[in-house]
Amino acid sequence: MISLPLLPVYLVDSLGAALMIVLAFSAFVHARRLKRLEPANFLWTFFFWLTLTLSALAISRSFWHLVRYLFVLAGHEEIWQAVRPYSGGINSLAFVAAAVVTFYYHNTEQVVASGRREAEALRQANDELAEAHEALHQLNQTLEERVERRTRALRLSEEKFRSLFEASKDLILFCDQEGRIADINDSGLELLGNGRREEVVGRPFADFFLDPEKGANFKAEILRHGHVKEFESRIRGADDSCRYLLLTAAAIRSEAEGYQGCQIIAIDLSHFKQMTDQLIRSEKMTSIGQLAAGVAHEINTPLGIILGYTQLLAEDFEENPEVKETLATIEKHTKICRRIVADLLKFSHPAAEQRMRPGDINRCLEEVLAIVEHTLNMDHIFIHRCLAEGMPPVSFDPERLRQVFVNLVTNAHHAIGSEGIVGVWSRHHPERREVEIVIGDSGSGIPAETVSRIFDPFFTTKEVGKGTGLGLSVSFGIVNDHNGRIEAHSPPLDQELAAVGMRTAFHVWLPVAAETAGE
Amino acid sequence: MARILVLDDVADAGLLIKKILERQGHEVLVFCDEDEALRYAAGHEVELAILDMKLPKLDGTEVLAELKKLKPGLAAIMLTGFPTKGGARQAARLGAAAYCAKPIGKKELEETVAAVLAKGEGGCA
């Protein structure tokens, strides 16, 4: 019998039993879900089995409690007493199962701890990784900045060198391995090819040397020493002009592939060289003129004595042909000496002694041609006249200038030998207030190495006794005294002259007379 | 034939002129010193003077000027190793009959002297 005061106790027990089943099952369902999610997870497996056994225990215990109340309420306490041992046994079995599970997973705590340690280690590693990542990111950023900075610096440097290359008034060029011009700046292009890139780029630089041997030397020197410094050379410039360049070059080498080519910087010294040459020549003329005058003066007296006594002796030996002949030879050579001395004196003739007066230069030329024409025609040499009309008066000493023209025409005659043309031009250059006289010949031409020395005193290509080597020096001196210039070109620079077969041309420039310059 | 005074600082040069002109029949007196020449001219008859322009003490033209003071009618030939237009003009102004460049040949000398003595003036070719 169940007494009424015990009713709340039973009620609580019954409800507790039901609640126990519900909670145990919900825990089991939860554990099972977790286990399904991570079948390998040790903890979830443990929870799964523990909640399973606990659910079994909850069912077993609560079932028997409810059965007991049903029997008691029905008044069949004895039946409950009969099944009570079974209830205890089944409960115990469930309880043992739970205990077994707990024992089986007795080191759960350690496992969990180890799991935690692993998780901790993993977290630490993760942190470290994050730190490393951050550092890497920072480094990356700095690197980017540095790369950007370097790129900027590089661009500036590139711009600087590009402008140096392009704006330089000196010639700068790069050659490839074979020595062909790979790149060249504007100044160089102007100098070598009149600004036409296709005429310059791709051509071997050695081709531009007027002296091929020098070009080969230049190349060999770069290969041998890796550089060339202040290499003087004559270069064929635009329109076949001769340029005097000072070359400095350095080889470009890479460690992997060796010689890659070379870079060349060239300074155009043509103008400077021309000026110094002129200066040197005029200095040389002046000092030689002074020397010549001194020597001529001193030699004249003894020369006169030799000549006079020889002539006296010749008179004494009028009857002895052998002695007379010997004396005649002495006299002849003494007279040659006298001519040389006289030329030397003319060469150093003081300017104050000139009889300068304004006159017609064409008439002076015609007078000279009239004298020499016959001699020239005898050797089948004909005169090609191109005298400009309306030439302004020029202040000159007719006697001395005639000497210059006779000299030039005689030289032209000698250069031709026989059969040829002597060309004579006169031109007026109003813009420079100059007249130009050109005397050219169709002769053998003058070798380049001779042209530079042609005005030097005593320089002659004629055989001994035929020329004193003073003709052109004297002419140079006379033209100089007239404030003019004289130049020799072989072959002629002027295409008009070359067209009529001139091989050599002498140009004389004289200033237009001062009083007429303003008219 | 004439009496000719020659003044040249180089003795051999003077002697040469003497030898050439003596063959022509002239009487030639050679001096190397200006003072001696002037002293001789002061005391003797001389028709022609051949003077070197370059002398140790005086200039040839200065000697000519002195001689002209002594003998205004004296003919003179100037010889120079370095002919200049200025020198020629000065010589002509002082009354020199000829102004010749050295070295002077035998024939040239004979002809010049003959011309000067004949006409009182002459020239060098």
Image (cartoon, coloured by chain):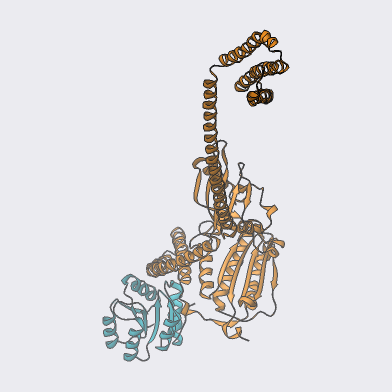
Which quadrant of the rendered structure holds the N terminus of chain A? top right
Residue A250 lies, with reference to residue B10, above or below; the image says above
Rendered image quadrant of residue A345? bottom left
- Say which of A356 and A378 sits in front: A356
Q: Which chain is cyan?
A: B
Residue A130's spot in the image, x, y percent?
A: 55, 37
- Say which of B12 and A465 sits in front: A465
- Say which of A193 and A214 sits in front: A193
Rendered image quadrant of residue A97? top right
Residue A188 lies left or right of residue B75; in this view the side is: right
Residue at (58% x, 75% y) in the render: A510
Rendered image quadrant of residue A423? bottom right
Which quadrant of the rendered structure holds the C terminus of chain A? bottom right
Residue A217's spot in the image, x, y percent?
A: 54, 44
From this viewpoint, is residue B67 visible? yes
Residue at (63% x, 48% y) in the render: A181
- Say which of A295 and A334 sits in front: A295
Residue A104 lies left or right of residue B46; in this view the side is: right
The tint of chain A in the picture is orange
From this viewpoint, is residue A335 visible? no
Residue A486 lies left or right of residue A78; in this view the side is: left
Residue A18's spot in the image, x, y percent?
A: 68, 24
